Image (spheres, rainbow, N blue to C red):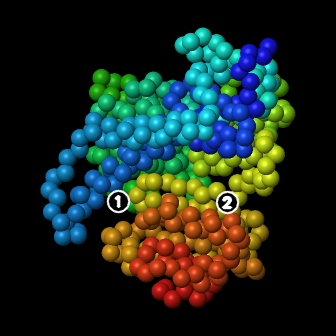
């Protein structure tokens, strides 16, 4: 069955997990190939992390222009060039995708365009416009990603009921939009469309928006959203839709009763499902758990020689986690020592405003786990740099084990949160205590001083509280 296309590592998918796995495999001397059915870079670079942040940056700048007078600047009546906003986002995606193409070429990695499916555990068919070819693979790394999970009764049609893909390239700015699901994706798009001038309602089944975040963090974001005019409905669900000539009217069941919301578009952001259907995994014996590949700490599936990384391997569904999982898989294949993957110290970020960055246990989960907890908090309204920049909503919160000073979790909501959380992740990686953060000299005036002060507050030694 050998065709001459024989590789030591074949990576299926070229997103932030796949392309990183391929590059690390090549660095370790493995003959490597990538199979990609669309643009290299995957969802993250082409339809996720990068282009969404470009959209959010346009919204941030617009919001700042509207408040320029607070800084003694006059910026009357800023206008939106909607096609220009979309173009900026797409340009960012294209630039990053081309960068990945360059890296794959630089590392002498073969790229086969088409859809992959297993013939058996060590042979992959690649079906594309040029026909079907077969690759022989000593090792396979599955990095096929995931796609939006549909909600019964709200099936995607690409126009009025949409996922994040369509939400980034709508031909016109909707006047009214319903967002179902208040995780990171839903919250970011709710903020974006609100700033752009749409009337927005966001509906979440759980009792808070950003359900996986610390409750106090979620409360700050919700207050900001409500102040902005976004209708927030938690402990609620969409129950039905009526189609009319002037749009669609959605029925929302809330703790206070049912209400209706007319919208031009409905963004469904209730989770994702792994891309596994086209792989013909029945020919491999691969096992799934709740629709995702089952893997161990070294990203090995139940079938020898087959690995799975990123979203198709389940939570955490984060690009940066996928990249490190790809490195782990490549190093395991090559016999290169590595510690395996632990997801205990993976940061999560949400790029609405106020921004969110977090790592580790929330206060609630820490207490439920039996820890004797000390909590330290520092408000950005007391931080000189935040005051100078005009962004004072939010805080840094340390959750610390009283006995050993272990930093169980840190939760940041406010300016620069996704950047600030990196310091904490590094510190936790090397098992620094709360005292280590409190005694580290931070530059003044900086937002990072809030990390130092919050750690000090957990110990009872903060100065500016």
Tell me if mark 1 has few (under 14), some (14-19) or many (20+) residues whose alpha carbon lies within 10 angstroms of its own.
few
How far, Cα to Cα, is label 1 from label 2? 33 Å
Quadrant in which residue 381 is drawn: bottom left
Quadrant in which residue 137 is drawn: top right
x, y percent for residue 285: 83, 26
Please say if 212 is above or below 179: below
Residue 145 visible here: no
x, y percent for residue 439: 60, 84
Q: Can you identify the residue that label 2 sits on?
A: 345
Tell me if mark 2 has few (under 14), some (14-19) or many (20+) residues whose alpha carbon lies within 10 angstroms of its own.
some
Which of the two discs, 1 and 2, sits closer to the camera? 2
| 56 or 44: nearer the viewer | 44
x, y percent for residue 428: 67, 68
Please say if 254 is above or below 101: below
Residue at 60% from the left image edge and 24% from the top image edge: 112
Which label's residue is closer to the chain start, 1 or 2? Answer: 1
Residue at 46% from the left image edge and 75% from the top image edge: 379
Q: Can you identify the residue that label 1 sits on?
A: 227
Please say if 140 is above or below 327: above
Residue at 64% from the left image edge and 12% from the top image edge: 132
Q: Disc 1 on helix, strand or loop?
A: helix
Label 1 close to label 2 by CB (< 8 Å): no
């Amino acid at each position: 069955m050998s065709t001459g296309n024989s590789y030591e590592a074949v990576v299926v998918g070229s997103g932030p997990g796949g392309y990183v796995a391929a590059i690390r495999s090549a660095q370790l001397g493995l003959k490597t190939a990538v199979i990609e059915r669309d643009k290299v870079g995957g969802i993250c670079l082409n339809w996720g992390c990068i282009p969404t942040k470009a959209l959010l940056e346009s919204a941030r700048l617009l919001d700042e222009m509207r408040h320029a007078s607070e800084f003694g600047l006059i910026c009357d009546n800023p206008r939106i060039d909607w096609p220009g906003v979309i173009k900026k986002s797409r340009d960012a995606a294209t630039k990053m995708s081309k960068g990945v193409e360059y890296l794959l070429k630089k590392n002498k990695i073969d790229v086969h365009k088409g859809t992959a499916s297993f013939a058996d555990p060590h042979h992959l068919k690649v079906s594309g416009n040029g026909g079907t070819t077969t690759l022989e693979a000593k090792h396979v790394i599955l990095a096929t990603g995931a796609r939006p999970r549909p909600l019964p009764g709200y099936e995607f049609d690409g126009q009025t009921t949409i996922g994040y893909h369509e939400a980034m390239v709508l031909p016109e700015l909707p006047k009214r939009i319903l967002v179902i699901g208040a995780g990171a994706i839903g919250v970011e798009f709710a903020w974006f469309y609100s700033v752009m001038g749409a009337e927005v309602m966001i509906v979440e089944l759980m009792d808070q928006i950003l359900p996986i975040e610390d409750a106090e963090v979620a409360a700050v974001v919700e207050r900001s959203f409500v102040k902005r005019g976004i209708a927030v409905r938690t402990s609620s669900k969409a129950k039905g839709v009526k189609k009319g000539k002037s749009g669609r009217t959605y029925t929302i069941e809330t703790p206070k009763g049912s209400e209706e919301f007319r919208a031009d578009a409905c963004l469904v952001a209730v989770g994702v499902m792994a891309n596994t259907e086209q792989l013909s995994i029945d020919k491999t014996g691969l096992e799934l758990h709740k629709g995702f590949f089952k893997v161990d700490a070294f990203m090995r599936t139940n079938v020898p020689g087959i690995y799975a990384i990123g979203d198709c391997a389940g939570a955490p569904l984060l690009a940066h986690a996928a990249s490190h999982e790809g490195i782990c898989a490549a190093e395991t294949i090559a016999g290169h020592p590595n510690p395996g993957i632990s997801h205990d110290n993976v940061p999560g970020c949400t790029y609405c405003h106020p921004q969110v960055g977090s790592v580790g246990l929330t206060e609630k989960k820490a207490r439920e786990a039996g820890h004797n907890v000390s909590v330290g908090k520092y408000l950005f309204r007391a931080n000189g740099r935040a005051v100078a920049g005009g962004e004072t909503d939010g805080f840094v919160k340390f959750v610390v084990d009283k006995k050993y000073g272990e930093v169980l979790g840190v939760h940041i909501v406010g300016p620069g949160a996704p950047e600030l959380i990196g310091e904490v992740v590094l510190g936790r990686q090397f098992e620094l205590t709360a005292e280590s953060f409190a005694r580290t000299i931070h530059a003044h005036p900086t937002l990072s001083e809030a990390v130092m002060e919050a750690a000090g507050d957990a110990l009872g030694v903060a100065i500016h509280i």
